[in-house]
Image (cartoon, rainbow, N blue to C red):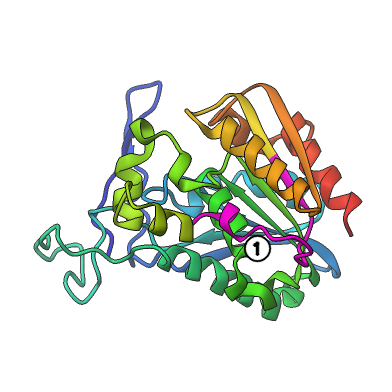
Amino acid sequence: TDLRSKIVESADGDSADLYAGMENYETRNLTVHYRPGTSGRPVIVFVHGGAWTDGDRDWYDFVPASFTAAEGYVTVLVNYRLTSESVFPSSICPSRTSPAPDVSHKAAWYPDNLNDCADALAWTVAHIASFGGDPDRIYLFGHSAGGHLVSLLSLHSSYADLRGRVRGVVTMSGAYALEDVSMTSFSDALDQTFGTHTDPVVLGEASPASYIVRDLALPPFLVLYAEDELPSLTAQAVSFAGRLQQAGLPVETEYLPGFGHVSEMESIEDPEASPTARIIRFVEEHP
């Protein structure tokens, strides 16, 4: 059960709750965008950001504008359980009319979010052909916390079987070595998600960089990062890509001048924007 609200105001003064549509409070779900009558198309599995504590697939319904409407790919938008302190299991609060539970209850911690993404990928492999997608041509795409999750899913030894179905990984402004991120910016999110922002063992276990080993059978990575980046994320991207390269693993990097942590993601709505065009080129070059 999700009791959160996120009120935003439009330019004309109207306000709306971005979480109002989550009536069944179910965050382990996905939406498939596809062109009817097609088959064998590349599949983009998108995992949103939000510091692991925030976000919803429906906020990113602009992503298929480029990948599905313009390019004819199949796009899968994934919701995973969030680690916000105000998320509670449905057994405690089965409806929106029930009293709010004590804040000590949480629906999810890491690795619940990672397991949810793995389940979404497994579902995609099993079912995407029914929507015109090629289950042997799946590309993971994650932004921010989503970049962390798709990178970890691709590198972690527990998901080696699923990794074999992935043809490429696009990670945009992710976190890859959690013990080295800016604690001024991320300590609260780390505490809510991993239970600590100080224990290097816990953070290391949850870091994609910890699983880089030479000769790993890894799909090619595209590591993107913006000019106006959140604190420490530029260093995270450069270091992560460098470690992949040093291990002899396939990786490409792209610096996005003129973009920020938010605007790079917003640009995905436009197939001609440089971040979007770079992702499309990556997909086409790695069939």
- Quarter containing the C terminus: bottom right
Question: What's the magenta region?
Answer: 206-223
Which quarter of the rendering shows the N terminus?
Answer: bottom left
Q: Nearer the viewer, residue 103 or 34?
A: 103
Name the amino acid type tagged 1.
Ser
* Rendered position, 236 above or below 138: above
**Lateral position of residue 52 relative to residue 192, left or right:** right
Residue at mark 1: 154
Q: Could you tell whether 21 is left or right of 244 in the image?
A: left
Splitting the image into 4 quarters, where does residue 129 fall? bottom right
Q: Quadrant of residue 98?
A: bottom left
Residue situated furthest top in the rendering: 258
Across and down, in percent, residue 214 comes to 75, 60
Q: Position of residue 117 (x, y in %)?
A: 54, 66
Residue 46: give x, y in percent of width and height.
62, 55
* Residue depicted at x 53% and y 31%: 262
Percent of width and height locating residue 93: 17, 69
Query: On the picture, is 229 further left or further right than 124?
Result: left
Q: Is residue 207 magenta?
A: yes
Whether 241 is drawn above or below 193: the answer is above
Front residue of 90/119: it is 119
Check if residue 64 falls in the magenta segment.
no
286 lies left or right of 196 = right
Q: Main secondary structure of the magenta part?
A: loop
The front one of 132 and 83 is 83
Closer to the camera in the image, 37 or 169:
169
Residue at the spot 65% in from the left edge and 63% down from the top edge: 154
Label 1: few (<14), some or many (≥20) within 10 Å? many
